[in-house]
Image: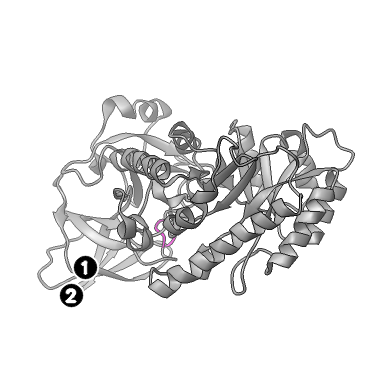
Amino acid sequence: MREYKAVPLGYAAAEVAALGESRPPLHDFPTPLVTLSESAVAHNLATMAEWGRNAGVGLAPHGKTTMSRELWQRQLDAGAWGITVATPWQASVALGWGVPRVLLANALVQPSALRALAPDADRLTVWADSLRAVEIMTESLTGLDLPEPLAVLVELGAPGGRTGARTIDEALAVGRAVAASPALRLAGVAGYEGALAHDARPEALATVRAYLETLGALHDGFESAGLYPPGASVVLTAGGSAYFDVVAEVLAPRRDLDGAGGRVVEILLRSGAYITHDDGFYSVITPLGRVGGGEFRSAIHGWATVVSRPEPGLALVDAGKRDFPYDEGMPVPQAVRPFGTERDLPLAGAVVTAMNDQHTFVRLPSHARVEVGDVIRFGLSHPCTTFDKWRALAVVDDALAAEPRVTGLLETAFG
């Protein structure tokens, strides 16, 4: 198992397979290491499922966060409508793993990818925000033996945002083109509000709310223009992990699962980071901190060994940018496990000041007793750029326990 940096040196495949029975202590595992706390994952799955039920929205969690077959299945088992992906390759992975409904939150405009995914058109939904995208999809798919027309959501954006038609009129034109295509089916409206704000100030939330109202207006425009296929169900989707409360507030009233209003309408959040949460960006901006309904717990932690104390107040550890995320905030030192012991001690006042590829600079307060050989536990920010650094993560019962035990290995699929 040398290809997995999360596995102790010398471990054979049989020893990895038996982790659930042997439950070795975490201190037997090498650093750098990222762990996944099972107790926190189970809590987060249940919390998000309950919140969605109470808020009146469905969930198609973004699978690119973890690219883990095991975690995707647990999200589906917890009631998720399907799994969201971002690229054709990710869509092929999801379809190959048997995910019943896959939402590709992007325009699919590569002819070879369209043809490759065409046999699974009955399980796949894609986005479009331009007439050119509709033209490419139509040309690539017309004449193929599709199980059904490919479902397309028209993406509405906003000035300064990410992708998406910039006005409702432009989006309506895209919708008309989809409805007229022999290979496509207009299946609803999509958008992403997370690019329009980055905090929870009232003005930021107002910007998000106003944008989401335009998504609803676009759906109404499609309905009044008769662009949806008669009797077909449709989807309205938005919502990353930062503003899903506002999505529910604005869009949930449009949900109609029994078609009482004449058409089945599903409202889908695409939040993905909730399953592991973090100790950085999402811990600050999570909607549950604003509206209640429980709390998420950080399930991802980094562990690194102090390899140098070259100056007073400075420790260098053996993890860096290749191991820990840094794009949404530096790792946060939380605790230290002194060399030769099994219990972590609080490490208040320590801060990460810089990272190299394989080293992290930790500035220590004067009272800290940290020596070469000690292991530091770090809180991490942004699960999406944590998982993609690891082909496998060590699963522990509880990373914050006095003596965490490793219960298994979670494999990921990153190309």
Give the residue at x 34% y 65%: 360
The residue sitting at 45% across, 44% down in the picture is: 56
Where 9 sits versus 64, above or below? Answer: above
Where residue 30 sits in the image (x, y, percent)? 32, 46
User: Who is closer to the viewer here, 23 or 119?
Assistant: 119
Q: Residue furthest front?
A: 261
Local packing at callout 1 (Cα closer than 10 Å; few below 14, some 14-19, many 20+) is: many
Q: Please, what is the three-letter code of the amino acid marked with disc 2?
A: Pro
Rendered location of residue 276, percent (x, y): 38, 48
Instruction: Give the mark, 1 or 2, whose residue is nearer the N terminus.
Output: 2
Q: In this view, does 326 lie to the left or right of 115?
A: left
Looking at the picture, does residue 171 appear above or below residue 363? above
Q: Tag 2, which secondary structure?
A: loop
> Quadrant of residue 242 in the image?
bottom left
Residue marked by disc 2: 312
What number of labels is visible? 2
| Amino acid at the residue labelled 1 | Ala
- Which residue occupies 80% across, 60% down? 131
Q: Quadrant of residue 281?
A: bottom left
323 is within the stretch colored magenta: yes
Region in magenta:
321-325
Q: Say whether residue 279 is visible.
A: no
Q: Can residue 139 be seen in the rendering of this structure?
A: yes
Residue 263 vertical position relative to residue 158 in the rendered view, above or below: above
Q: Mark 1 points at which residue?
A: 350
**Percent x, y for residue 1?**
44, 36
